[in-house]
Image (cartoon, rainbow, N blue to C red):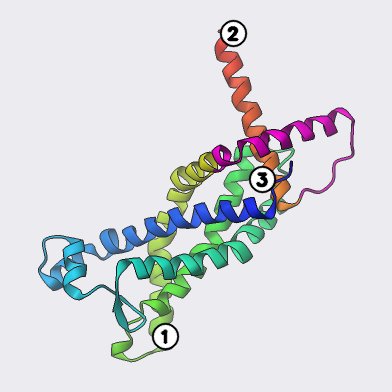
């Protein structure tokens, strides 16, 4: 059974909800935590944020939950209409999900996604967090954008590759294990009947990768049992 549009939306939702919380933590605690405590004289980052009246966003101080919601909306829209489809197309130009190792294809998609989403979200963040009380200057905004890309890209790459995407795929396979199993059985039947391979859509390619990962896991498990 191919992964349908609803499941694709769920996959994007899980990815974005984890990513946004990770980025807010990274931005507030890792990147700006020391500065916030120094300015306010507070003993902790959360205390410093509360003392300031919230997080500065678009010319006013907002509560953290508001910041998370705003970033989630932007990130989800970008992921659905740019990040996910474009990263698949870029990865497919270099690798074939049916011929290359599934981990190679997954890694290519993750790298392409980071390469697209990090500059795009950093661009949006440039205007969300720009210090408008000092006036607006396009050169300063572009410089801030470049700074954010340099700060966010390493974090985005390593967290998506080694933590977020493996976690998202585990959650996704748990939620839709019946559909994935049914899709795998259908795929096996088509292979047995010798049906001609057609170019895979994004959703079918993801399902195919999941199927091949499960097959490799079963082979490894069988080898360990035989030893």
Q: Name the N-terminal-most of marks 2 and 3.
A: 3
* Front: mark 1 or 2: 2
Residue drawn 31% across the image and 67% down it: 64
Give the residues in magenta.
172-200
Q: Callout 3: few (<14), some (14-19), or many (20+) C-alpha neighbours within 10 Å? A: some
Query: On the image, numbered disc 2 is attached to which residue?
Result: 226
Q: Which mark is residue 47?
A: none
Q: Secondary structure at mark 1?
A: helix
Q: Is residue 166 above or below residue 32?
A: above
Whole-percent x and y of residue 46?
A: 20, 62
Which quadrant, please, contains the C terminus? top right
Q: CA distance from mark 3 to mark 1?
A: 41 Å
Q: CA distance from mark 2 to mark 3?
A: 31 Å
Q: Secondary structure at mark 3?
A: helix
Q: Callout 2: few (<14), some (14-19), or many (20+) C-alpha neighbours within 10 Å? A: few
Q: Secondary structure at mark 2?
A: helix
Q: Callout 1: few (<14), some (14-19), or many (20+) C-alpha neighbours within 10 Å? A: few
Q: Which mark is residue 139?
A: 1
Query: On the image, numbered disc 3 is attached to which residue?
Result: 206
Is 147 inside the magenta-drawn segment?
A: no
Q: Name the N-terminal-most of marks 1 and 2.
A: 1
Q: Which residue is nearer to you in this view: 141 or 191?
A: 191
Which quadrant, please, contains the N terminus? top right
Q: Which residue is nearer to you in this view: 62 or 147?
A: 62
Is 195 inside the magenta-drawn segment?
A: yes
Q: Is residue 101 at least partly visible in the picture?
A: no
């Amino acid at each position: 059974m191919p992964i349908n549009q609803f499941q694709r939306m769920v996959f994007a939702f899980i990815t974005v909800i984890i990513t946004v919380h990770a980025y807010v933590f990274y931005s507030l605690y890792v990147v700006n935590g020391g500065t916030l405590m120094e300015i306010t004289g507070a003993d902790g980052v959360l205390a410093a944020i509360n003392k300031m009246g919230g997080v500065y966003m678009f010319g006013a101080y907002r509560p953290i939950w508001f910041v998370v919601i705003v970033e989630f909306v932007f990130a989800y829209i970008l992921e659905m209409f740019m990040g996910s489809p474009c990263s698949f197309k870029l990865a497919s130009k270099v690798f074939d999900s049916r011929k290359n190792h599934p981990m190679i294809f997954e890694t290519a998609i993750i790298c392409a996604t980071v390469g697209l989403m990090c500059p795009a979200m950093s661009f949006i963040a440039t205007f969300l967090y720009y210090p408008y009380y000092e006036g607006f200057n396009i050169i300063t905004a572009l410089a801030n954008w470049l700074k954010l890309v340099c700060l966010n890209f390493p974090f985005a790459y390593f967290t998506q590759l080694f933590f977020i995407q493996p976690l998202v795929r585990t959650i996704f396979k748990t939620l839709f294990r019946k559909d994935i199993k049914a899709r795998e059985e259908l795929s096996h039947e088509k292979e047995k009947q010798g049906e001609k391979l057609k170019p895979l859509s994004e959703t079918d390619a993801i399902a195919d990768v999941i199927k091949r990962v499960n097959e490799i896991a079963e082979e490894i498990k069988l080898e360990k049992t035989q030893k």
